[in-house]
Amino acid sequence: MDPRREPPVSTGERGGTRALLIGASLWTVLMAHLLRLPCRVPGWDAAERLPGLCAPAGTAGEQPALVGMLTGVLGWFSARVAALLGTDGTVLDGLPGLLLVLAWVGVVAVVSALSGRRQVDAFVLALSPVVVLVGFSAWDLLAVLLMLTALLLHVRGRPLPAGIVLGLAASVALLPLVVLGAVLLQGLRDRYLRDALVVLAGTAATWLLVNGWTLLTAWERLRAGGGSAAAGEASLWRTWARTGLGPEAAGTGAWALPALLLGLAAVLLLVLLARWDPSVVQVSLLLLAVVVLVDRQHPLVHALWLLPLVLLARRRWIELAAWQLVEVLWWTGLVLPGRALPGGVLLGQDAQEWLTAARLLFVVWFLAAVAVDVLRGRTAMGGTSARHE
């Protein structure tokens, strides 16, 4: 990699940048809290009028094994502190939420590290409206942090720690495995599989360590959790069915797996045949876009997964702003239906369907644009692994 002739960044400048990034991240946390303030005001009946806004956080209910361990430790800590202070422990009920806040600050910090000197990427991420809407209502944010940390470790040439962290990420959600796929594809392209195999071994061993007991005792629950669900309103399959050109939404299950395999095969060919080495960030985004596009559900939380990789791989503020606007409008029409507003309908059903199609088209655009970047030799921020530099 060619050295960049830029003046060194002083410790004071780095410290100031970190402080600003933390402040921007906490501002987003504050906006998310204020957005759901009506849900906590007695007598406003916001939970009945706006169920999508006031739905229980994803930190409740059935949890992945790693999340169960973390919440178990937090519960034990809360009980010990409550016993020590002689209280009922309700003052510590917000610890899981605090964990998500810390995860969010960590996500911004890792993107800052992957961005190098281009800290504007981290600032844009820190102020993302999508994170305000959905970031703190699901455990996905923790998985995103672990996925990006594994990516950073791989970029810095530390395959075993990268595999361990990736195994932890896969214990929260399966989407982080796109990074493992990107690492393996890079290994195939370079005919240097040692690092890729170390990452694979670390990922598999860590995942089995965390999930082994659940795998042995609750296999049926794990298999049921991975089963195919009905096509959601915002999915590619439901949108395709509504055009009248495709099969009924209930019959699209047979199309999902072939479409996924075809998309993954296309990414494989692109990576192996490209003239220039693609970065692990670009390949991860390509794989993630394929998985998201063919998924039978396309909730807003998918944008939470795509956003950091899009920022690092594309760096196009106009397309990013347009995409975020579409996501926000789609969420508004979904969560704030006309019956909940004193002024009548905010977004009609036709507008909502157009926004749904626009969301899918943006995923297609990112997929195509990054593929063109790879063919043209344009490398994403974050580079590839350290041994390529």
Image: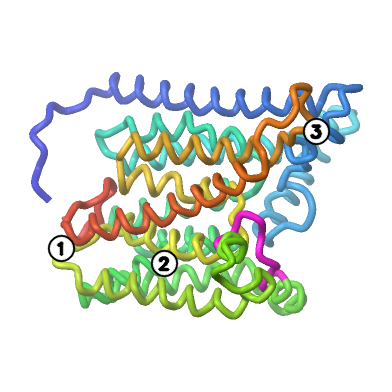
Q: Which amino acid lies under the numbered mark 1 shown in the image of this protein?
A: Trp
Location of residue 187 (image quadrant): bottom left
Q: Which residue is mark 1?
A: 276
Q: Residue at x 67, y 26 (%)?
A: 35
Count the labels in the image.
Answer: 3
Name the foreground residue: 147 vs 266.
266
Q: Is residue 46 visible?
A: yes
Q: Which residue is mark 3?
A: 339
Q: Residue 72's spot in the image, x, y percent?
A: 75, 51
Q: Residue 296's spot in the image, x, y percent?
A: 61, 65
Q: Which residue is mark 2?
A: 180
Q: Residue at x 27, y 46 (%)?
A: 381
**Alpha carbon distance from label 1 to label 2:** 20 Å
Q: Which amino acid lies under the numbered mark 2 shown in the image of this protein?
A: Leu
Q: Which amino acid lies under the numbered mark 3 shown in the image of this protein?
A: Arg
Q: Which residues are magenta?
A: 225-236
